[in-house]
């Protein structure tokens, strides 16, 4: 297979050139050249047979490694093809060198073509490299809720060049993998538990202990809020309430509530709605920013 492709790329007048070369050589020199060529040809055939077996063996090894690493199917086939082409190209250059043909021009040609293609497809190659990194190291997977490049949504599909997100308002966002693999990203699905941090502003003069007691009752009544540490997590703690700051118009009370990641938004909205209703029913006031304007009459 290799030699058939090799002779196809020879110039059309190769036979005439070879005939002139042989006729101009002395007999002794011609015999030496023929013997050397035959020896090199036999060596090239042996190297081809052994190299062909080694290439197939190496491709099988790479295939098994990729299968064990559970690489994405699209990346698996592409990487397999890249390894196969690279090994066959290396074998071809070795055989050409054994036959006595100068290989530096071939290598320079391949290098120049690679540089030209790389410059023309720099952005595409960056996205491809990002896709490879994402599929190999798996910072997120299909179904995860992530925030990156100014967008937040559920990962719908991971392609070799792009990642497709579905936002909470049912929009499809296509993010190039180049920036996604090198930029900052939040993965909200990785951890099993999340903490809901909220701050409530109550008027000065309010009984802080009563405010904290009312919020604690609300946290205890919510079934999604974890009331203490759990065995499979080192970070989950009991609900916490504390005065975080003396604001311009009121007391800033912070709350921390732990829950399962899937219950985050349920706890978030429950706490906001219930705290407002319960504190208002108990007579607590929620201050707001106010500006006093004084009008001076100079007349």
Image (tube, rainbow, N blue to C red):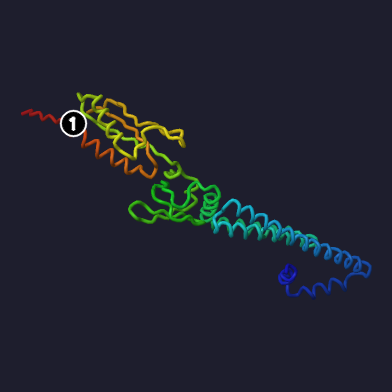
Residue at the disc numbered 1: 282
267 left or right of 129 in image: left
The relative height of residue 268 versus residue 59 in the rendered view (above or below) is above
183 left or right of 251 in image: right
- At 48% from the left edge and 55% from the top edge, which residue is drawn? 158
- At 43% from the left edge and 41% from the top edge, which residue is drawn? 192
The relative height of residue 142 versus residue 224 in the rendered view (above or below) is below
The picture places residue 268, in percent across and down from the top left corner, at 31, 40
Task: Label 1: state its secondary structure.
Answer: loop
The relative height of residue 285 versus residue 66 in the rendered view (above or below) is above
The picture places residue 122, in percent across and down from the top left corner, at 54, 54
Q: Quadrant of residue 264?
A: top left
Q: Nearer the viewer, residue 219 or 175?
A: 219
The picture places residue 25, in percent across and down from the top left corner, at 89, 70
The relative height of residue 208 versus residue 261 in the rendered view (above or below) is above
Q: Nearer the viewer, residue 65 or 54?
A: 65
Q: Quadrant of residue 224?
A: top left
Q: Nearer the viewer, residue 134 or 283?
A: 283
- At 31% from the left edge and 31% from the top edge, which residue is drawn? 254
Which residue of the protein is positioned furthest toward the right in this rendering? 28
Image quarter where the N terminus lies is bottom right
Image quarter where the C terminus lies is top left
């Amino acid at each position: 297979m290799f030699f058939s492709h090799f002779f196809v790329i020879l110039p059309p007048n190769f036979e005439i050139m070879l005939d002139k070369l042989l006729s101009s050589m002395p007999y002794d020199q011609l015999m030496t050249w023929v013997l050397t060529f035959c020896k090199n040809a036999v060596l090239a055939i042996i190297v081809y047979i052994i190299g062909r077996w080694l290439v197939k063996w190496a491709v099988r090894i790479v295939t098994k490694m990729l299968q064990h690493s559970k690489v994405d199917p699209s990346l698996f086939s592409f990487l397999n093809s890249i390894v196969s082409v690279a090994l066959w190209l290396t074998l071809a250059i070795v055989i050409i060198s054994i036959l006595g043909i100068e290989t530096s021009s071939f290598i320079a040609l391949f290098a120049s073509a690679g540089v030209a293609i790389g410059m023309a497809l720099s952005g595409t190659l960056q996205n491809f490299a990002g896709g490879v990194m994402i599929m190999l190291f798996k910072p997120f997977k299909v179904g995860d809720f992530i925030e990156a490049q100014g967008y937040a949504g559920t990962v719908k599909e991971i392609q070799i060049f792009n990642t497709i997100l579905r936002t909470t308002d049912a929009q499809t966002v296509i993010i190039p993998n180049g920036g996604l693999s090198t930029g900052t990203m939040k993965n909200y699905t990785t951890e099993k538990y999340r903490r809901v941090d909220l701050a409530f502003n109550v008027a000065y003069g309010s009984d802080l202990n009563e405010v904290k007691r009312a919020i604690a009752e609300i946290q205890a009544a919510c079934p999604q809020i974890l009331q203490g540490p759990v065995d499979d997590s080192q970070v989950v703690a009991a609900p916490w309430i504390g005065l975080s700051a003396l604001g311009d118009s009121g007391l800033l009370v912070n709350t921390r509530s732990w829950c399962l990641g899937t219950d985050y938004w349920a706890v978030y909205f429950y706490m906001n709605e219930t705290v407002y209703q319960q504190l208002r029913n108990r007579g607590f006031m929620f201050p707001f920013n106010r500006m006093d304007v004084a009008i001076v009459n100079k007349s």
